[in-house]
Image: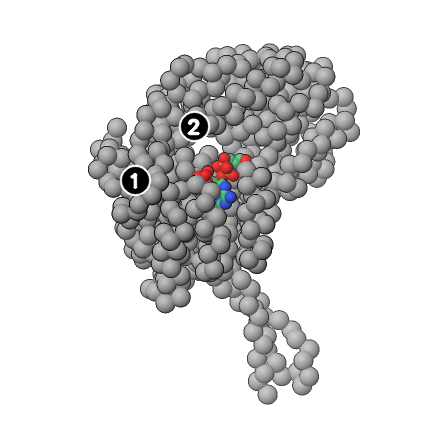
Amino acid sequence: MLSETQYFLTEQEKGAFINGKFHTDIVGDFVNVVNPATESVLAKVPICNAPIVNKAVEAAYDQLEKGVWSKLLANQREKMLLDYAGIIESHSAELAELLVLEHGKLLTDAKKEVAAAVNCFRYYAGWSTKLEGSTIDVSLSGGDHFAYTKREPVGVVGAIAPWNVPIMMFAWKIAPALACGCTVVFKPSEETPLTALRLAELSLEAGIPNGVINIVTGKGETGQAIIEHPLISKITFTGATDTGKIIGQNAAKLLKEFTLELGGKNPVLVLDDADFTKVPAGVSKGIFYNQGQVCVSGSRLYLPKKRFDNTLADMASIAKKMKLGSGLEKETQLGPVVSESHFNKVMGYIEAGKKDNIELVAGGEPWKEKGFYVEPTIFANTANKEVSVATDEIFGPVITAMPYDGVEDLLQKANATEYGLAASIWTTNLKNAHYFADKVKAGIIYVNSAVRSDPNLPLGGFKQSGIGQELGKSAIEGFTKLKSVCINYS
Ligand code: NDP
């Protein structure tokens, strides 16, 4: 283990990070952060209650209204975000290792996640100096009025994140919020709070003033206290659809702005003109990357009838050869899922699939006694039954394949879900690519690829997969309020 990681885990006292300091004097309940590869306890963090959340929100509000942050010029914010990106980059090795320890993902993927967060901060640094409004023609009497719009920070942002890509979530929410001049109270998932705490601590090295980024650890009650705080103006939430519904209702009752990035049961549409030399590996990557714990993973696979058996045989051969193990071991291709409760949920779905008599083509068992490992699992639902492995978001390394018969049948099946987050289309025909990209109801469509993101590419769900969008210019719109100014110069 790197000495910095060791120090952070064993020496550094960790509490909520408020106003530039760890608050280690919090009394009450704590939650253990567990390494999913070994089941050993890495650290414990407090469950922050409403008075602690209040301290964090007040620190953020002070900076927003009257602190150094509120007085910075746009290019000074830009410089701070660029400096922050550089500092995160210089701590990449340590952050990636900490991420593997708290989450279980592969070290190579953890390094890519840190690099993606660095890119995200650099991308949004540039937006700091590009906020703009418009001049507006108004037809007011006398013709002697001048009107314009401008963008202002939405206020103190309450950010509530899941555990699947903890460093990326930190960047996706905090980078655009800061670029817009907002300040933030961020609640990481109880499963993976350590990287957020370390990232917040590192923000001070970039000169980001105390109180601009605050972290409150805890469970749902902590998130609830953020939403209910009167000085929070906007909630940005990523997580499960059921949680999102509660959060949306609570935020709406208090007339707060909110965006919800929610779950998916994403279809993979393999057309009969696809390049079948690439499909098995591409689709496998799309479901087994990060142990299937990605909101845009393709978990419902639609194959043409005549290609069904061969393609599944190729995928089963890939799955059976995958090397399971700790994310820190070089040869590992699939790590553990994030926690014991999530392991039980994923295994529960697999057992339900078996009971529903869906053919198991690969995997289906836990691996190793210690650690939360699930074999890469493939079901063949040849009769297209309405069963939970085919309809529910499992958020694990589990894919269910179904045959289809013709274009309209494929489209009907792909859209027959309450979700609408992502879809992946495999074809060599440009016309088909556009046709399906238009007709599939999902917020992001991948053609001949899967599970990709770019800071400039907006991500948001249709139907039960969310409201609003993250990334790109959309996030800038989400963290600002448009103000209209009308001047009578007569
Ligand atoms: P959850 O919805 O369980 O939790 C998300 C966050 O919300 C956690 O920090 C959680 O706290 C908190 N929370 C739970 N209940 C409440 C509440 N009542 N009020 C306020 N906050 C609350 O999701 P998971 O962490 O299990 O993440 C997996 C889900 O996230 C999947 O459904 C996945 O699809 C979705 N996701 C969506 C993405 C997208 O961009 N659309 C991207 C990534 C994931 P805690 O867990 O600490 O108790």
> Label 2 vs label 1: CA separation?
26 Å
* Residue 468, visible in the rendered structure: no
Instruction: Say left or right for 381 vs 73.
Output: right
Q: Determine whether 227 is above or below 146 in the image.
A: above
Q: Position of residue 404 (x, y in %)?
A: 73, 22
Q: Nearer the viewer, residue 62 or 456?
A: 62
| Image quadrant in which you'd find residue 89 | top left
Give the SS element for disc 2. Answer: loop
What residue did someone put label 2 on? 339
* Residue extending furthest toward the bottom: 490
Numbered disc total: 2
State which quarter of the image contains the C terminus: bottom right
Q: Residue at x 64, y 38 (%)?
A: 420
Q: Is residue 425 visible?
A: yes
Q: Amino acid at mark 2?
A: Ser
- Circle 1 — which element? loop
34 vs 15: above or below = above
Between 9 and 440, the one lying in front of the other is 9
Badge nearest the viewer, 2 or 1:
2
Decide which of 69, 179 is in the foreground and name it: 69
Q: Which amino acid, by three-letter code, is at mark 1?
A: His
Among the 4 quarters of the image, the one containing residue 165: top left
Display coloring: one colour
Q: Quadrant of residue 136?
A: bottom right
Q: Does 351 sit left or right of 35 as displayed?
A: right
Residue that numbered label 1 is attached to:
91
- Quadrant in the picture for the N terminus: top left
At x 70% / y 24%, what residue is drawn? 386
